[in-house]
Image (tube, grey):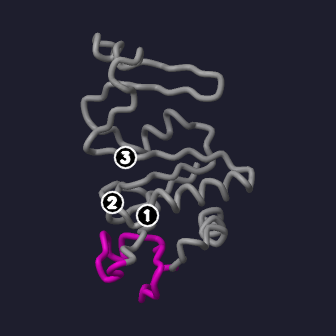
Amino acid sequence: MKTAAFVGFSNTGKTTLLESLTAELKRRGRRVAVVKRCPHGFDFSPEGKDAARYLAAGADCTLVLGPDRTALLRREEALPDPQAAAASYFPDADFVLIEGGKNLDAPLKIEIVDPADPSRRVLSDDEVSALVSEREIDSARPVFRPGEVERLADFLEAL
């Protein structure tokens, strides 16, 4: 299992890039899992729906099964480590792509650079393995354009 954290400021294109990269890796026959970090919380199950009602009643977790997807809603006391969660929930994945995680101790971090201001960075070159930027950027690390998902997938597969 190869794990990569994709970091960057809000609205820099992380989700769009991960959608395209996921599709490219799937086209190559790889098993891909994506972890979306939500440190400020989220509400996956609408108020009044069964899963939300079970959680409101005190259930520690609820599993929603459908013909084409499964959702696990589980109470956590703290934000779980994405790498540990991925190893637990996706043991057969070839790639785990984490959206967010600038503070993770991830072996591979790729920063999506702010297109409005490429000098504004979340991490230093020493903390990343590669960059994704719409503009020319001076870096000792490999730099990919947002549309170069095939090259980025090649980079991930080579690691």
Q: In the picture provided, is 132 more to the left or to the right than 48?
A: right
Label 1: element kind: strand
Q: Say which residue appears at 56% left-offset and 55% top-offset.
A: 19
How many C-alpha atoms fall within 10 Å of the one at disc 3: few (<14), some, or many (≥20)?
A: some
Amino acid under disc 1? Lys
Q: Mark 3 points at which residue?
A: 37
Residue type pointed to by label 3: Arg
Q: Is residue 121 magenta?
A: yes
Horizontal and vertical percent for residue 74?
37, 25
Nearer the observer, disc 1 or disc 3?
3
Q: Is residue 55 above or below residue 5?
A: above
**Residue at figure coordinates x 35%, y 78% from the top left:** 116
In this figure, which residue is indicated by the disc labeled 1?
Answer: 109
* Dominant SS type (magenta): loop
Residue 73, quarter of the rendered image: top left
Q: Distance between the residues labelled 1 and 3?
A: 14 Å
Range of the magenta residues? 116-142
User: x and y percent of residue 50 in the render?
Assistant: 41, 14
The mark lying in front, picked from 2 and 3, is 3
* Tag 1 and tag 2, C-beta contact below 8 Å: yes
- In the picture, which quadrant includes the C terminus? bottom right
The residue nearer to you, when weighing 14 against 93, is: 14
The residue drawn where x is 55% and y is 37% is 90
Q: Nearer the viewer, residue 142 or 61?
A: 61
